[in-house]
Image: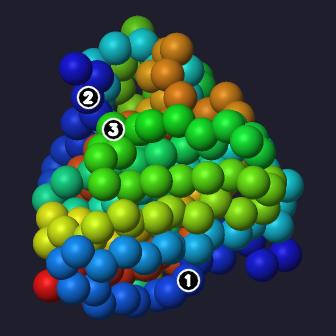
Amino acid sequence: KNEVEQSPQNLTAQEGEFITINCSYSVGISALHWLQQHPGGGIVSLFMLSSGKKKHGRLIATINIQEKHSSLHITASHPRDSAVYICAVVFSGADGLTFGKGTHLIIQP
Amino acid sequence: NAGVTQTPKFQVLKTGQSMTLQCAQDMNHEYMSWYRQDPGMGLRLIHYSVGAGITDQGEVPNGYNVSRSTTEDFPLRLLSAAPSQTSVYFCASTYPGGFATQYFGPGTRLLVL
């Protein structure tokens, strides 16, 4: 079965810390997405990756296709970064996204 | 642009009732999809559409129907609601292929008693 695994499930850190969230998947993909879900429930797209690395502000996403692994990094974390971060992939030959269960991040002041 | 809109935001149903969750987008996206989100589980694909007149089943289609008569609208119908369908439902739209940004609606919280 095609699966997406995220770690950790829960992460609590202090403001200013460097945060890493990991995502691994079972078989080849055509694209990987990182999403953010705020406490109010809305989901927004952060990145779409098919190779390499992308950066947007304090957020950095990397992907290693050979190792079937992606990471989302947050530098200089802030309480407003508190949210659920979701990894989702498009498996090769498939339609639609398969989602990880999410990482619940809390940044304390 | 309004983006992706969903109505209603919250609904309570009794077992056996039917209802339609509305989804609309104004970005001319060909690909639209419905997901459900349950505690402890990732979002799961219910149905999707790659264009007007074309729909297909996702991972958890049982108990749901969809249609796509226009590019803009993609309603989800619950035929006979069951407590197991208590969930938060998200509609999303994008361009086909998986390489484009996904746009999500604000969600519909459904409680089936």
Secondary structure at badge 2 equals: loop
* Chain where mark 1 sits: B
Secondary structure at badge 3 equals: loop
Q: In this rendering, do the residues under marks 3 and 2 share a single chain?
A: no
Secondary structure at badge 1 equals: strand
Q: Amino acid at mark 3?
A: Glu
Residue with the mark numbered 1: B7
Say which quadrant the C terminus of chain B sits in. Answer: bottom left
Residue A36: name its quadrant: bottom left
Residue A25 image offset from top left, x and y in percent: 31, 25
Number of labels in the image equals: 3
Say which quadrant the N terminus of chain B sits in. Answer: bottom right
Residue projecting furthest to the top: A66
* Chain where mark 3 sits: B
Residue with the mark numbered 2: A3
* Chain where mark 2 sits: A
Q: Could you say which disc has been placed on residue B59 in the image?
A: 3
Q: CA distance from mark 1 to mark 3?
A: 23 Å
Q: B51 or A72: which is nearer to us?
A: B51
As drawn, is B29 to the left or to the right of A52?
right
Comparing marks 1 and 2, which lies closer to the viewer? 1
Q: What residue lies at 35% left-to-right and 45% top-to-bottom?
A: B61
Q: Amino acid at mark 2?
A: Glu
Q: Which comes before the other along the chain, label 1 or label 3?
A: 1
Residue B30 image offset from top left, x and y in percent: 76, 44
